Image: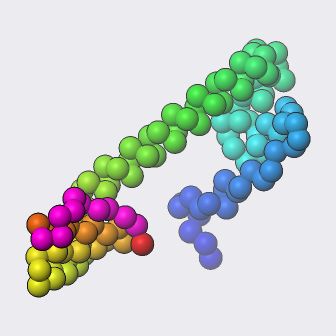
Amino acid sequence: MADTKRPTLSLFPEPGPLSNPPTWEDIELLALNYPTAHAYATMVERGDITREQALIAMVHWFATAFSRQFRRELDAQALESPDTIVMADCGCSTHTYTRRRTSELKCSAHQADDAVGRR
């Protein structure tokens, strides 16, 4: 039995492709699975706001949510500790962190700055 207390990505499925050209029906399809889109679509149906106002508010809300999530990711990355450290004979080292991020620290002989990447 699935854990009903933990959210899963199935709650927020991929929205799918936009119609060409995009229409308000695309927002109504989003409203089926995304509570914020549902709230704004409902306000438009009641006549509280226009479609344009709803679109502006939704873009702002989703951008804010993305920004918060990005900030959480950066904060988590800054706090994580290395899982493994591999030192080369020349002085270069490779740090692998718990979230599988790697940081390569080059020695002065290789004359390079830090290079951070993901595997």
For image coordinates 31% across by 49% down, the residue present is 75
Residue 2: image x %, image y %?
61, 72
In the image, 74: left or right of 12?
left
Q: Splitting the image into 4 quarters, where does residue 110 fall?
A: bottom left
Highlighted range, magenta: 109-118
- Residue 100 magenta: no
The number of numbered badges drawn on the structure is: 0
Front position in the image: 23 or 92: 92
* 85 or 28: nearer the viewer: 85
Residue found farthest to the bottom: 89
x, y percent for residue 49: 75, 16
Image coordinates for residue 100, horizontal then vertical, percent:
36, 71
Tell me: 65 left or right of 26: left
Q: Which residue appears at 74% of the width and 50% of the height?
A: 15
Q: Is residue 37 visible?
A: yes
Left/right of residue 101 with respect to residue 26 in the rendered view: left
Depicted 82 relative to depicted 21: above or below: below
Quadrant for residue 60, please give it.
Answer: top right
The residue depicted at 20 percent of the width and 67 percent of the height is: 105
Quadrant for the N terminus in the image: bottom right
The answer to whether 8 is drawn above or below residue 12 in the figure is below
Say how the picture is coloured.
Answer: rainbow
